[in-house]
Amino acid sequence: MTNSEFRDPCHKPRARKLSLRYVAGVTLIELMVGVALIAILAALAVPSFNDFRERASLRGAVEQFSSRLAEVRNESVKENAIKTVDFTTIALPNDVTRSALSMTSDDGDGTVRVNPRDGMLTADSQAGNVVLSIGNYQLQFSVTPLGRSTVCAPSGHSVPGYKDC
């Protein structure tokens, strides 16, 4: 005979109490391993994020130069007056520097004047470029005699999304 045959039919077996030690959830070691994994992943992502931030700042600076030139060309045609673009006064994002500023006009270095009839540069303006840089990245913003702008990356300083000069 087995034990179940000797028991009282009204007797109900008691459910075992589970110890809180086994029900509590995550142990301290498991938590520490999880935190360590998150820290390792964060350490791997930080350099990528810094490169992304630098490229975004550089793109923003180039867009400011392009939009300022387009804005002045539009004003010149609209008001039928010669207008000057001063590339030395454009505010740049933090850490972005400008160099090799080769545009000139009668209004000074770093400026070009726009003719209202055709949107081209005036005879006294010399087309040129400016190099914007941050960290290991550089972009060259150029103004053509036609009053148009081009952007490229100097050789050795490639920036995704821009062709090399």
Image: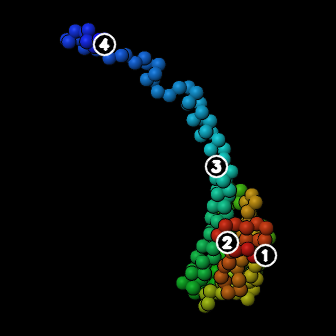
Q: Please name which of the two marks, 2 or 4, marks the residue nearer to the observer.
A: 4
Q: Amino acid at mark 4?
A: Thr
Q: Amino acid at mark 1?
A: Ser
Q: Amino acid at mark 2?
A: Tyr
User: Would you place residue 131 above or below residue 94 in this image?
Assistant: below
Residue 142 in the image: state x and y as whole percent. 72, 77
Residue carrying label 2: 162
Residue carrying label 4: 2
First along the sequence among labels 1 and 2: 1
10 Å neighbourhood of mark 3: few (<14), some, or many (≥20)?
Answer: few
10 Å neighbourhood of mark 1: few (<14), some, or many (≥20)?
Answer: some
Q: Nearer the viewer, residue 122 or 147?
A: 147
Q: Please name which of the two marks, 2 or 3, marks the residue nearer to the observer.
A: 3
In which quadrant is the C terminus drawn? Answer: bottom right
Q: Give the CA separation, mark 1 to mark 2.
A: 21 Å
First along the sequence among labels 1 and 4: 4
Residue 122 in the image: state x and y as whole percent. 70, 87
Name the colour scheme.
rainbow
